[in-house]
Image (tube, rainbow, N blue to C red):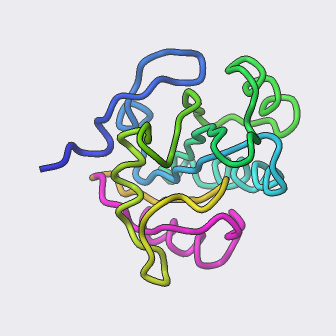
Amino acid sequence: MSTDILDLPIARLDGTATTLRDLGGKAYLLVNVASRCGLTPQYAGLEQLARDKSDAGLTVVGFPCNQFMGQEPGSAEEIAEFCSTTYGISFPMTEKIEVNGEDRHPIYQQLTQTADADGEAGDIQWNFEKFLVSADGEVLGRFRPRTEPGAAELVSAIDNALA
């Protein structure tokens, strides 16, 4: 039996130990992020979602990852500075992790078992792949990298999870 995804240990960007459950929420939007990617402007939409839906119980969590063409090369401090000054990010960010391969973080070992709308599970395709997880740890949806944070299908799934 797998461990509840919400209880798997992870460190915050500042090194503090936590779990997703500790971050609180009625639903979680988990996103592997990068600072030097063509999709990096999605940070603005993620921050908007976090601000618009946090009172309803959404917790957006960013997972910095450098596995896609070295697009997240910075230190924890550099990532935090970039996210704060460029996008005003207020949602929680974790330590830099791997989302694919032998060293894939246990949270992503579970997430990648979930199929997207086309029925495809497996490896993360690129930066900014999104997973919607319920308060009881069920993965409710997988949204590929090009799905913008404000996309109707994503917002609708978030609203349903928060209802």
Q: Position of residue 108 (x, y in %)?
A: 42, 48
Is residue 158 located in the magenta-colored stretch of the structure? yes
Name above or below for residue 48 compared with residue 64.
Answer: below
> What is the residue that sits farthest to the left in this orientation?
1
Is residue 111 located in the magenta-colored stretch of the structure? no
Q: Nearer the viewer, residue 66 or 59?
A: 66
Which quadrant would residue 65 be assigned to in this image? Answer: top right
Left or right: residue 66 versus residue 58 is right
Query: What residue is drawn where x is 31% and y is 45%?
Result: 5
> What is the residue that sits farthest to the front in this orientation?
102
Q: Nearer the viewer, residue 133 or 3?
A: 3
Left or right: residue 36 versus residue 15 is right
Name above or below for residue 126 compared with residue 101.
Answer: below
> What is the residue that sits farthest to the bottom in this orientation?
118
Q: Position of residue 35 (x, y in %)?
A: 79, 40
* Quadrant position of the C terminus in the picture: bottom left
Q: Nearer the viewer, residue 155 or 132?
A: 132
Query: What residue is drawn where x is 53% and y is 34%?
Result: 97
Name above or below for residue 16 compared with residue 148.
Answer: above
Query: What residue is drawn where x is 60% and y is 70%?
Result: 155
Q: Nearer the viewer, residue 33 or 18?
A: 33
Left or right: residue 138 versus residue 28 is left
What's drawn in magenta, residue-wise? 137-163
Q: Position of residue 129 (x, y in %)?
A: 60, 59
Q: Position of residue 121 (x, y in %)?
A: 42, 70
Q: Count of labels shown?
A: 0
Query: What residue is drawn where x is 63% and y is 37%?
Result: 64
